[in-house]
Image (spheres, helix red, strand yellow):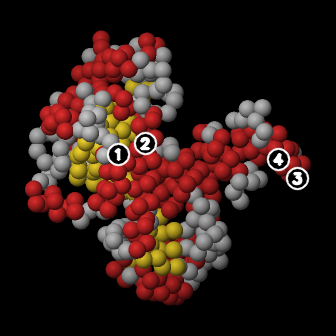
Amino acid sequence: MTRATHGNPWIAVRPGDDVAQLARLMSSAHRSFVDGDPARSVDPAAAGHDPVRSVVLDSWLRSRNKGVNPDAVGDGVDLDGIELERYRSAHPMALIRPVIRKLLVDDAADTGLLVAISDAEGRLLWVEGDSQAKDRALAMNFVEGADWSEDRVGTNAPGTALALDHCVQIFEAEHFSRTVHDWSCSAAPVHDPMSGQILGAIDITGGPRVAVPEVLSLIRATVAAAESELRLHLLNSPRLLGNASPRLQVLGSERPTLVRDGDRTSLSQRHAEILLLLAEHPEGLSSDHLAVLLDESELDSVTIRAEMSRLRKVFGAAGLGSRPYRLLTDLGSDVQEVRHALDRGDAAAALRVYRGPVLPGSVAPGVEEIRADLRGRIRAALLRAGDQGLLAKWTSTVEGREDTGAWAAYLSSMDRRSPMYDQVKSRIETLDRRLGV
């Protein structure tokens, strides 16, 4: 089995693809993977590219390792009746359902399309759209209240989108379950705009035309509109999503902030340093180790105890342990979100979250190490991606404006006839002269 190495891995059917041929290739590849029959392997050259996208093959491997049965998707639901009604009416996704209905559902009648809204665990809260398609979907248990997480039914757009925290398309036999091979789907996760926490997913399910790039763009635009709507709700009612884990914001020049239950608390630099370092060391830190990470001259234990005492009043005594000092509750951060985006290869998402260096005014050795590592990882991802738009954005930042390597990559991504080409080339020459290159 080989992995696809060309094009956008999140798109299932690319412009120019022969859909019928792609369906045959994927069906053969799926049989080869599931049944382990080498005689059914696919010749990549026959399709012009590797038949199985990396994102799909990785999902197949996860599905198999989780023991998912490729010949069944179950016939039960986790929630139904009054229990389902109560759960989804109180769920944050209910707040944005009107937007989703307006943008996707209202035009889905008689189109063969279904629009599904799930929670963060992959349970389907609403399945709406074409009535005949809803009836057909009963055969694969694609119904309200059913669990469509990747762990339960294997590779599928809403479940895999939640597993990877990224929009994705799944075309016919790319589904791990054979029962779903007549369907294609496009889905994207929805986030709490304040904390970044995943709230659920939006999915469009139907025939092969659902797996083209334009539908993925439509899903992403709907998610953006839904998250904007949710942000308005939260501005009016900050405690609306009150069960989210606290989140630490330490990127960029703004004052570090702790966001919890919709409330924003400004932190001193020292308190932000401590929380960040404790988040980096879930195993805990001794007083001496924490002191070394905070100050090269090594703070004394009395000073550390005093700072921790003050921090408990801000963060809450129940959230901080001692001997060693450690976090007793989950603490998210914008640093963590950038790393997660980089781990899944999404340089664009990482750059969106990365508003600037980690606690730029801090000289704490532990923070300086985190700052340098995160900057290096982002820069490497941008250079590897070679995306002109992302490089343009990076070279306009404080950290990127004198990054000669990024400027060179930016130039190499441009057409020589572009009006920006000479400007970028001139900028590189100016930097070379200034740096004595």
Q: Which residue is drawn at 29% across and 26% down?
A: 173
Question: Tag 3: residue type?
Answer: Arg
Q: Residue at x 37, y 48 (%)?
A: 103
Local secondary structure at mark 2: helix
Q: Name the residue under label 4.
A: 427
Q: Which residue is drawn at 37% across and 74% down?
A: 237
Q: Where is residue 127 in the image (x, y as percent from the top left)?
A: 23, 46
In this rendering, the answer to whether 357 lies above or below 125 is: below
Q: Earlier in the sequence, mark 3 or mark 4?
A: 4
Q: Position of residue 172 (x, y in %)?
A: 30, 27
Q: Name the residue under label 3.
A: 434
Q: In which quarter of the image is the C terminus?
A: top right
Q: Earlier in the sequence, mark 3 or mark 1?
A: 1
Discs 2/1, front? 1
Q: Earlier in the sequence, mark 4 or mark 2?
A: 2
Question: Tag 2: residue type?
Answer: Leu
